[in-house]
Amino acid sequence: MSLHRENSSELSMRRYDTFIYDGIMDHYRAEWVANPLRNPKTARVFAHFISATGPTLSIFERKPRNASAIFSETPVPNYQQGLWTYVLPMMALNHQGLLHAMLALASLHIAKLQNTSVTPSYKHYAYALKRIHHCVGNRAKRHMPTTIAATLLLGFYEVMTADHLKWSSHLAGAKQLFIEIDFKGMTKEYRRIKAEAAAQEPQNLYDDCETALQERNPNKTFKNLSLAIDESLVSTLIGRKLKYDQFGQIVEDTPNRQGPNESIPSALDTQKYELYQDLFWWYARQDVYQAIVSGNKLLLDYSRWADCPPRASMGRADAVHGTHDHLILLLGRIAEFQARDRSRKIKVMEANGGHWRPPANMDFGSPTLNRGAPLFPPAPGTSGPPGQGFGPPQGFTMGGGRGQMEPPGPPPQMPTFYGMAPSRSNAQMPSSYVIDGSNATPSPKSDRSDYDLENATQAALDEWFQIRAALNTFKSHFGPQFQPLSPELHQPTLTPFGPALQYRSYDVANLWGLYYMAYIIALRAHPHMPPAAMMAAGIAAQQTAEYTRLIGQIAGGIVPPHPGQALNPSLGASLCEISMPLFFAGVTYQHPGQRDWLVRHVRDIEARTGWASVGMIAQGCETAWIKAYEAGRGPPYQRTKEVWYVEESINDSRITRKGGHFDGVEPDPSDLSDKRWASTNAGTRVHWAMGLLSVEDDI
């Protein structure tokens, strides 16, 4: 309490350095038994997690990210208990694994912000690994929310360091825990409990909608949230018929769907169920991100995603997290389709002599010829689609502007990786998460000898147009409060992309950025596009140009107009969120002003938030532009900052995890130290953006 009173007040703005000072990590020592209630230095690091690191983890949460609630001297109402700012930090005080994971992430965050030693964070990381290893091996602790949260936090630790291979490994462990949780049974019981409670409420209790919005209490407005989810809409988004009243189970047959029924107690704790929901949707967001960047399949089979329903109904301005969950469901479907359809695309290339070629009568407007349908969603403020259709490309462009270079000749050589960057085809789950008879996702079956390529292509086209229809349906459910603000309601800001788009809140703006990113990925995943995502990005540049521009306008409305403007953690979180859409849009930017704006602001976001993965977006985009120029398919570009190269890194055992260990010695399976996870040579760390950063020989 005293620490909070000394470093903040009701009139002061929250900052990234509210509880820290220069040199705080110089004399900080990680302890095996951490206790922020007794150790003042540990308390400062823990307070930094609550006030700065935690609010940056996710902006789409069920309850407000009120970092001051945990320091209150009076009881905190349930609707003010944020996931990463109250609920889990309170649980961490009685769970050393989760506490060390939070301290590891917070101390790393401080080190990144101040450019100081990361050794304390490594020690907390190692301590957390040992504690979590014990928990996942204990039947009573394996499925506790604290165990799952600690696993996900260690994965996010790797996001901050931009070590995405280890990130995927932790996600694979979390995936196994979610498989073992009976979401279907819990969903049925949860809906029954909520329905009974709703029936006992006075009918006019919340007739005054304004009162309900002011309280922003999901526990008192569940009539409009939990039970009002549009099953028809969710069915459209996932492409299967769904009825939550039938145990939350997909109506269609789903083989190999077995799961333990011991993870749900006889008397359901509704708050614990909501906590599982919050953690699942944070996991799902990370799972779909690793899939769209690496080009790999989703770690958690997509047939299981709908078992956990969205946390709120679609299109509610007072429950933006519900719209986010619906969008993640749709983005997961796009990622699953893109990865699954790759084998068919490769067969098409083989039939064409190993080269990608557009079909003779390439029609991207409809699944069958002469039945045109609008390909693109209407831009904000318009009622209809743009007039331009998705015609056959005349060459390989990188940006979509008029008068661009469209050189004739054969297409460039197909990359040896299929995502936005090279990656292993499967993430290795930590051995401690594996149990006998675990419900792992079944391996794909081998191709049949009687594979009908023509019918398979038509089926892929039909499915793709269903996905496109789902994208347009999703957009139609955005409410009026999700639309851009009219010019008279905000200070106009000009960007190289056009006037910045301003929304009622940063989370709404980020939802639009994610939506247009999903549409861009879907266009690049069209069945007639090549299987490599980076190659498809160049070919579809003209068709995605409008939406890459809109993402730039949305980002322009989030980025502070003045470089020296103070940055609070909430704004920093929104800036980190918009960085992923900027990556997918930015690789095709050609205008010098747009490129300069992206690199300058993304590097500033990295420096001010401490998120290393954000900086890799700038490096990746720069190298994409340079390679486009070298191939004669884009204007010249000169890098603004030296890139981090690792020659022959693609064959390094630290990447492939084959052969010897980091020091050339095989690891001891019983060794749980951080040596299994952390490289002693930072120069060998590999980033997903290596697909854009590496030299030709690496690719």
Image (cartoon, grey):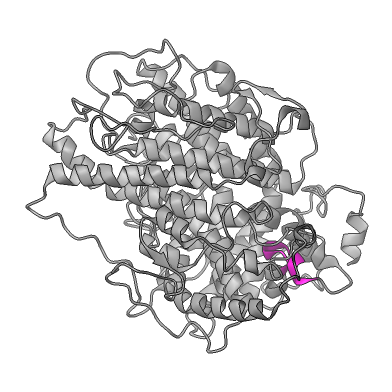
Q: Is residue 378 above or below residue 436?
A: above
Is residue 269 in the magenta section? no
Q: Is residue 241 left or right of residue 87?
A: left
Q: Position of residue 31 (x, y in %)?
A: 70, 70
The magenta segment is: 77-86
Q: Position of residue 561 (x, y in %)?
A: 74, 29
Is residue 80 in the magenta section? yes
Q: Is residue 45 above or below residue 633?
A: below
Which residue corresponds to the image point at 67% horizontal and 65% vertical from the top-left? 83
Which residue corresponds to the image point at 71% horizontal and 51% vertical from the top-left? 110
Residue lying furthest bottom = 266
**Can residue 686 be seen here?**
no
Which residue corresponds to the image point at 28% horizontal and 50% vertical from the top-left? 340
Q: Quadrant of the N terminus?
A: bottom right
Image quadrant where residue 542 sits: top left
Q: Quadrant of the C terminus?
A: top left
**Can residue 605 be seen here?**
yes
Residue lying furthest front = 203
Residue lying furthest top = 403
Closer to the camera in the image, 238 or 266: 238
Q: Is residue 73 above or below residue 450?
A: below
- Dominant secondary-structure state across the stretch colored magenta: helix
Q: Position of residue 317 (x, y in %)?
A: 67, 51
